[in-house]
Image (tube, rainbow, N blue to C red):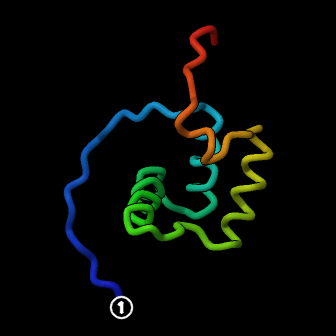
Amino acid sequence: MVTKKSVTRVQTGLRLERRTLKVLKALAEYLDVTLGDLVEGMALHAFEGKAPFSPQTLNVIAKLKEAYGLDLGAQDSHGLDDDHDR
């Protein structure tokens, strides 16, 4: 049994690449969690060097990336530039 910890959450405004956000929202819907819970879980796993997703969920993510035209990967994360013309 997992002991639940009481936390204080704050509202934040994150700027994310449009297609990335679409994939995250669709994944949160698929997993039946809020977008905030999904991002929080991903961060907590990353902080410990753990993979946040099972192989089955990674397959779902691949399908969502294809559906939303998301062609970015980890290698792109430090080389993104805002497209101000859109």
**Nearest to the observer: residue 3 or residue 62:** 62
Tell me where residue 9 appears, x and y as whole percent: 25, 52
Question: Up-down: is 70 above or below 56?
Answer: above
Which residue appears at 60% of the width and 16% of the height?
A: 83
Give above or below for 64 relative to 16: below
Quadrant including the C terminus: top right
Give the x, y percent position of residue 26. 63, 50
| Residue at horizontal 74 percent and vertical 40 percent from the top | 71
Measured as percent of width and height from the top left, residue 18 is found at: 60, 31
User: Tag 1, which secondary structure?
Assistant: loop
Neighbours of disc 1 within 10 Å: few (<14), some (14-19), many (20+): few
Quadrant placement of the N terminus: bottom left
Q: Residue tagged by mark 1?
A: 1
- Closest to the observer: 75 or 85? 75
Residue at the image point whose x is 66% and y is 67% from the top:
57
Residue 56 occupies quadrant = bottom right
Q: Residue at x 39, y 57 (%)?
A: 40
> What type is the residue that disc 1 sits on?
Met
